[in-house]
């Protein structure tokens, strides 16, 4: 549904998309519809895979709020992608407590295994590797999130290999 891959072009505000936004806004008092900003941005990301600058503008206009306020939300939260990402987005926590317990080692291992640097996407579009802020599971380090939802703990190199190999295999058979 996204009309372009980058920049100012926005996901079309179709009647279906508007209906989904309306449903989120209806959860809040009429004078507080801006409270639905995260939900609306999440819906855009579900549809388009990421939130472009144009999408931020579209959501800001829909919610009647300053564009900068929407931009602050998309840039503050790790889960919002501002550029296209791979099919599997891997966020490894490298905050200090995790760094002290092999978080950086896990990131390096993934960089080697996938042949990309942190922040990059594999050429087949399968994996994007990113750092993440504290995921609230410091005692389970190394920890990572897959696609902003699945939390993986105690990620030794062996477990990382199993994870990547498993995701690749699931794609090959789907
Ligand atoms: S510092 Fe990594 S989960 Fe808390």
Image (tube, helix red, strand yellow):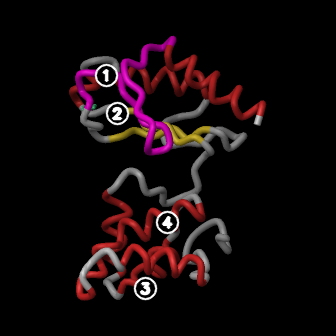
Span colored in magenta: 137-158
In the rendering, which numbered label is found on residue 93? 2
- Labels 4, 2: front one: 4
Label 3 vs 2, first from the N-terminus: 3
Q: Name the residue that disc number 1 marks.
A: 141
The image shows residue 41 at horizontal and vertical percentages of: 44, 67
How far apart are the alpha carbons under marks 4 and 1?
31 Å
Q: Which mark is residue 62?
A: 3
Image quadrant where one finds the C terminus? top right
Q: Secondary structure at mark 2?
A: strand
Measured Cα–Cα span from mark 1 to mark 2: 8 Å
Is the residue marked 2 within 8 Å of ligand 1, measured from its CB? yes
Instruction: State the CA–CA distance, disc 3 to disc 4.
Output: 13 Å
Residue 105 rendering spot, x and y as whole percentages: 40, 19
The numbered dot on residue 43 is: 4
Instruction: Residue 86: give its label.
Output: none
Q: Residue at x 67, y 71 (%)?
A: 1
Q: Report how far apart the C-alphas of labels 4 and 2 lie in the structure.
A: 25 Å
Q: Which residue occupies the extreme top position in the image?
A: 158
């Amino acid at each position: 549904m996204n009309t372009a891959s980058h920049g100012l072009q926005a996901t079309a505000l179709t009647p279906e998309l508007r209906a989904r936004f309306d449903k989120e806004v209806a959860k809040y008092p009429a004078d507080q519809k801006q409270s639905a900003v995260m939900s609306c941005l999440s819906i855009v990301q579900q549809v388009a895979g990421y939130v472009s600058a144009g999408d931020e503008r579209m959501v800001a206009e829909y919610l009647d709020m300053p564009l900068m306020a929407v931009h602050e939300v998309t840039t503050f939260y790790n889960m919002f992608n501002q550029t296209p990402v791979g099919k599997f987005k891997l966020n490894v926590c490298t905050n200090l407590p995790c760094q002290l317990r092999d978080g950086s080692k896990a990131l390096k291992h993934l960089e080697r295994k996938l042949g990309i640097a942190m922040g990059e996407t594999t050429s087949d579009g399968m994996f994007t590797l990113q750092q993440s802020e504290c995921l609230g599971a410091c005692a389970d380090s190394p920890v990572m999130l897959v696609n902003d939802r699945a939390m993986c703990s105690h990620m030794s190199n062996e477990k990382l290999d199993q994870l990547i190999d498993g995701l690749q295999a699931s794609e090959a058979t789907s």
